[in-house]
Every structure is written in structure tokens, then in C-alpha cells.
Image: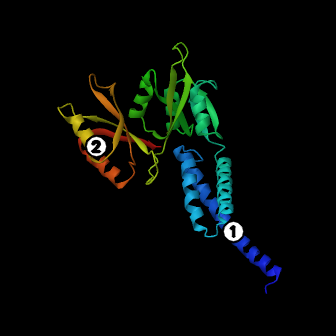
């Protein structure tokens, strides 16, 4: 019969291995934090965490032990998130207005541990990210009452930044008999998230492009998107500032653009579209 000291020695050996694995895990979290900072992604993703817990708990065969393992996994994820938040405290996020605005609320929701810089116009914020002065800029894309924000759309088309995250802020609009006023804000960053998110729900993407001024040119583009199984949520056109009576197009669609099928679609589009740009992916 084993002595209790044998059991304790066994636990000590396991704890030693766990310490090594714990350090290895947080070293990977350090790399993940750098990736999230570069791509302006939130620290936590509840859907991803829940899916991980659901899969991991099936590894435990003992019914009595399983709920304790679930607590262990969730606690480990909390620690990892806390570590990443500490690493990202130096992140600088630009927004428009002051702390009473929806822009600030959206920035705070997306990046709760960042430092925030209030600016007065979209162009300054956008170009500040391009130059490296800020890590990202949180700018409005569209409003449920007034439509798209044209100046931001034009910066999106003309500039080099990408969108990796979108957040909606809702408030009651004054003077509209209590009408609901929702604004969608996007986090613009210098890097494009190209990770294949296979299996993740609600994946979406944005592309901008121009087409030849000839019959059926736009329809051909839309047919390619549809043929690859992507559902368009919105299609908009904006005038080109440099060419009177010419337009560029903005499409927001549902689906994983970083999949093999998505890459095939982009290759087909590039053959018939000018200035084709994958602006970003998000969910």
C-alpha cells in the first residue's frame, strides 16, 4: 500500500510539469497579444472561449471531476486574458469627439485597457494610424437614421488601413419621437487579419472595388460573389473624387473570406475589377 508521501510526490511531479506548461502557455499568449494589438482585436471572444470549454471538458472521463476541470479551464483563460491585458496597456486608440460620444463608448468597449486619444476629424485619426502614431482608430461606418458616413467610406477606399472589428452603439435619438439611433463603429488598423476562421459563426467581410464603365460589369462581379456562396448584406456606391461621374463600390457580405473558396473568389474578382481591396474581416 502506498504511503501518503508517495501521493504527494506524485502531485509534486505533476505540478512541476504544469509549471513548465503554464509558462509555455503564457509565452504563446504573449505572441497572441502582439497579434491582437497589431490587428486591433479584442482580448476576449466569448464564443471562442465557450467552444473551447465545450470541447475540452469531453476529454475528462470522470463525471465527478469534469465540472472541476471546467472551472480550471475557465480560470486558466481568465489568467491568460489578464496577462494579455497587461501587455496591451500601452495600446493607443484614436476616436472622434469626447468621452460622452458613441465613438468613445465603442472604443472603450473594444479596447477596455487601452489609452485613448480624442481627435476632431476622421482624416487625422485615420492618417495617425497609417503613420504609426496610434495603434488603431475607432470610426463610424454607418448610422441607422442617416446612412453611411461618406468621409469614412472614402478614407477606407483610398487609404491603406484594414478593419478587423466592428461594434454597434445604440441610443435614443432626440427629436425623433424616441426613434432608435444605432451607429456601427469599426476599428481601423495597419494589419489585415488573414487567419482562417473556419467553423466560427457570423464571419463577415468588406471589399471595395471599381468596374469598367460597360454594360453588365457590376452584375458580373455580383454573380461571382453569389456563385461562391457568399450572401451580400449591403452594396453601396460612392463617387470617385478624382474622376467625375465615376464610382467605386462597397460590399459587405457574410462568410469566411480567408478560406480557400474565398481566396478563389478574390482571384476571380481581381480579373474583372480595378482597385479591388479586401478591407477587412470581422464577426
Q: Relative to the observer, which residue lies in front, 25 or 135?
A: 25
**Between 66 and 249, which is closer to the camera in this rendering?**
66
Tell me the quadrant of the picture where the N terminus can be found: bottom right
The location of residue 164, given as percent across then percent down, is 48, 42
Element at badge 1? helix
For the question of whether residue 254 can be seen, the reply is yes
Horizontal side of residue 126 vs 30, given as left or right: left
Quadrant of the rendered image containing residue 275: top left
Residue topped by disc 2: 226
- Residue occupying the far left of the picture: 215
What residue is rendered at 61% in x and 70% in y?
A: 61
Can residue 45 be spotted in the picture? no
Which residue in the protein does label 1 denote? 18
In the picture, measured across the screen, residue 241 lies left or right of residue 183, that is: left
On the picture, is 4 further left or further right than 165? right
Instruction: Label 2: state its secondary structure.
Output: helix
The percent coordinates of residue 111 (x first, y second) are 61, 40
In the rendered image, the vertical position of residue 17 relative to residue 206, given as above or below: below
Where is residue 108? Give x, y as percent: 62, 35
Q: Earlier in the sequence, mark 2 or mark 1?
A: 1
Q: Residues within 10 Å of mark 1 (few under 14, many from 20)?
A: few
Amino acid at each position: 500500500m502506498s504511503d501518503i508521501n508517495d501521493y504527494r510526490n506524485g502531485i509534486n511531479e505533476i505540478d512541476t510539469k504544469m509549471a513548465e506548461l503554464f509558462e509555455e502557455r503564457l509565452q504563446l499568449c504573449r505572441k497572441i497579444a502582439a497579434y491582437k494589438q497589431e490587428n486591433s482585436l479584442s482580448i476576449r471572444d466569448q464564443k471562442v472561449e465557450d467552444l473551447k470549454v465545450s470541447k475540452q471538458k469531453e476529454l475528462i472521463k470522470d463525471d465527478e471531476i469534469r465540472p472541476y476541470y471546467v472551472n480550471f479551464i475557465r480560470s486558466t483563460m481568465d489568467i491568460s486574458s489578464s496577462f494579455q491585458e497587461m501587455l496591451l496597456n500601452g495600446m493607443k486608440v484614436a476616436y472622434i469627439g469626447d468621452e460622452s460620444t458613441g465613438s468613445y463608448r465603442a472604443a472603450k468597449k473594444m479596447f477596455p485597457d487601452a489609452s485613448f486619444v480624442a481627435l476632431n476629424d476622421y482624416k487625422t485619426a485615420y492618417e495617425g494610424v497609417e503613420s504609426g502614431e496610434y495603434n488603431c482608430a475607432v470610426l463610424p461606418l454607418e448610422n441607422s437614421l442617416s446612412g453611411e458616413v461618406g468621409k469614412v467610406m472614402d478614407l477606407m477606399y483610398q487609404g491603406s488601413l484594414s478593419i478587423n472589428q466592428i461594434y454597434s452603439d445604440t441610443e435614443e435619438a432626440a427629436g425623433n419621437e424616441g426613434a432608435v439611433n444605432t451607429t456601427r463603429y469599426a476599428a481601423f488598423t495597419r494589419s489585415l487579419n488573414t487567419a482562417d476562421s473556419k467553423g466560427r459563426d457570423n464571419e463577415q467581410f468588406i471589399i471595395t472595388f471599381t468596374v469598367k464603365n460597360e454594360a453588365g460589369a457590376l452584375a458580373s462581379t455580383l454573380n461571382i460573389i453569389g456563385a461562391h456562396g457568399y450572401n451580400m448584406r449591403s452594396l453601396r456606391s460612392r463617387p470617385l473624387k478624382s474622376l467625375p461621374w465615376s464610382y467605386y463600390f462597397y460590399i459587405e457580405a457574410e462568410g469566411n473570406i480567408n478560406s480557400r473558396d474565398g481566396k478563389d473568389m478574390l482571384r476571380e474578382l481581381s480579373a474583372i475589377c480595378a482597385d479591388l481591396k479586401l478591407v477587412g474581416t470581422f464577426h
